[in-house]
C-alpha cells in the first residue's frame, strides 16, 4: 500500500490488488471512500468467505462501524487495483457534532440495522453478488483467505 496525504483530514492510498484493507472484528479507526477500482466485502464463516457486496467508484467502506462504535462487520479486499481515500474517525465525529442529535441517532439506527441485516445474510449464506460461484473462483477464495491470514498476523494486538 502506498499513501500520499492530500490534507490533514484525508489520505489517498494506492492499492495494488489483491490486498486486504481491513478484516471482520477489527477495531474501526477509519472510513474509506473508493475513488477508483473495485473492493469486495466478505464475511468469514467456518473457513469460507461469503461475499456481501462489491463496491465501485465513490462508494464508502467501513461506514457501519463508524456509527455503531463496534468492530468491523466485514472484511474488505481490493480485488482490482484501486485508489481509496482514508478518513479518520475522529475527524468524522467532529464533523458529526455539527448536525442535529436526531440526525445522528438516525444514522446510528441505520447502521445497527445494516449490521443486523449483514449478519442475517451471512447466517443464511445469501450473497448480493451474481454467479453460482458467489462472485469468485475457489482459487480466488483460497488466495483471499491466505491474504486475510497474513494481514491478521501483521496487525498489532489491541
Image: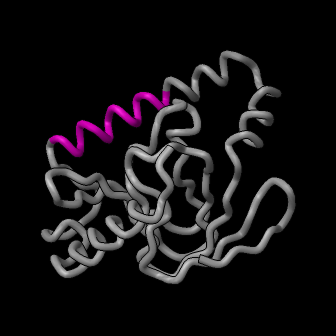
Q: Residue at x 45, y 47 (%)?
A: 26
In the figure, is residue 79 to the left or right of 156? left
Tell me if residue 121 is in the magenta stretch: yes
What's the magenta region? Answer: 110-123
**Residue 63 at x, y percent in the picture:** 55, 44
Is 35 in front, or is 150?
A: 150
Residue occupying image coordinates x 53% and y 54%:
61
For residue 110, above or below residue 155: above
Residue 53, position as x, y percentages in the image? 37, 57
Residue positioned most to the right: 7
Q: Nearer the viewer, residue 11 or 131?
A: 11
Q: In which quarter of the image is residue 66?
A: top right
* Residue 5 is one of the magenta-drawn residues: no
Q: Position of residue 131 (x, y in %)?
A: 19, 70
Does 69 sit above or below residue 33?
above
Q: Is residue 61 left or right of residue 29?
A: left
Give the x, y percent position of residue 23. Answer: 41, 55
Q: Viewed as shown, does residue 11 lie left or right of 143?
A: right
What residue is drawn where x is 71% and y is 17%?
101
Q: Residue furthest top?
A: 102
Q: Main secondary structure of the magenta part?
A: helix
Up-down: is 104 above or below 95?
above
Q: Residue at x 33, y 32 (%)?
A: 116
Amino acid at each position: 500500500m502506498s499513501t500520499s496525504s492530500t490534507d490533514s483530514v484525508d489520505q489517498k492510498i494506492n492499492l495494488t490488488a489483491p490486498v486486504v484493507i481491513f478484516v471482520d472484528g477489527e477495531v474501526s479507526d477509519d472510513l474509506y471512500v473508493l475513488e477508483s477500482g473495485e473492493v469486495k466485502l466478505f464475511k468469514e464463516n467456518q473457513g469460507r468467505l461469503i461475499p456481501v457486496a462489491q463496491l465501485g467508484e465513490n462508494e464508502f467502506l467501513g461506514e457501519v462501524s463508524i456509527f455503531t462504535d463496534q468492530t468491523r462487520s466485514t472484511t474488505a479486499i481490493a480485488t482490482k487495483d484501486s485508489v481509496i481515500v482514508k478518513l479518520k474517525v475522529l475527524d468524522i465525529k467532529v464533523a458529526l457534532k455539527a448536525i442535529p442529535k436526531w440526525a445522528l441517532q438516525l444514522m446510528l439506527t441505520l447502521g445497527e440495522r445494516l449490521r443486523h441485516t449483514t449478519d442475517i445474510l451471512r447466517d443464511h449464506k445469501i450473497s448480493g453478488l451474481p454467479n453460482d460461484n458467489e462472485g469468485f473462483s475457489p482459487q480466488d477464495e483460497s488466495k483471499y483467505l491466505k491474504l486475510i491470514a497474513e494481514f491478521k498476523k501483521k496487525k498489532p494486538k489491541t
